Image: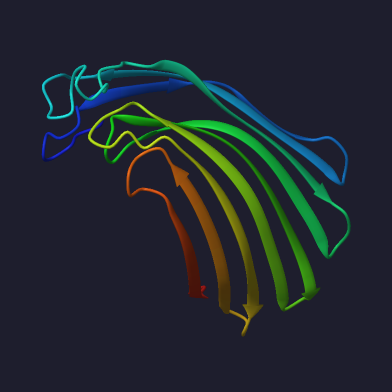
Amino acid sequence: MIDFDQEVNNDGEVFTIGPFVDWKITELIGLYAGIAWNDRDYDTGALTDGPAFGNDEDPSDYTWMVRLSHTANEVFNRQLEWYRSISVGSTANFNEVDGARYTLAYNITPRIRIDGAVGYEENASSGGLINDDFDRWIYGLSTELVLGPRLTADVGYRYIDKNSDAKFQSYEQNQFRIFFKYDF
């Protein structure tokens, strides 16, 4: 159920169904594949409804993901993902995102791991207040440190370069994060 408080976008309902397979092909190679059919039914009458904003579709479409994983040895593994998703938009009823992502992890020691990622996404918006069709590159590097038997720290950096068709929606972003996790 999609319920917007301010009636800028249309409320609606989503029904999703589909199979997936998670297959360990060999001891070192795995494959995940899933596909889902999504039926969306939006109400009418919101501020961004109708032909003026181009936000009047009720899409029924497929989403999917294929992920190939490779564990080279005890210290190195990597994954390659290719996907299509449909999500609720903040300035439109929905966004369709097609993307690809490559991630890797290297265990320097049993207590220190380095992770890296690079990804590309292309978004098509349903219209709305800001028709934010964009492409985006995402790069990331982080490290996980085991500080004790129950305490872990994650320190990371992520760079995002977004190129949008909409005015004032393109940006370059630098994100730094520090997480502490304690297992009770």
Task: Tell me the residue at 36%/37% (across/down).
Answer: 132
Task: Tell me the residue at 62%/48% (across/down).
Answer: 119
Examine the rendered structure and indicate whether residue 86 appears above or below residue 113: above
**Lateral position of residue 89 relative to residue 124, left or right:** left
Task: Tell me the residue at 88%/59% (across/down).
Answer: 73
Res 124 visible: yes
**Lateral position of residue 96 relative to residue 54, left or right:** right
Q: Quadrant of the N terminus?
A: top left
Residue 71 in the image: state x and y as whole percent. 83, 52
Considering depth in this image, is 165 or 182 the residue closer to the camera?
165
Residue 67 in the image: state x and y as whole percent. 69, 38
Examine the rendered structure and indicate whether residue 78 appears above or below residue 81: below
Examine the rendered structure and indicate whether residue 83 appears above or below residue 160: above
Determine which quarter of the picture holds residue 51.
Answer: top left
Examine the rendered structure and indicate whether residue 146 appears above or below residue 90: below
Considering depth in this image, is 105 or 98 the residue closer to the camera?
98
Q: Name the colour scheme.
A: rainbow
Res 184 visible: no
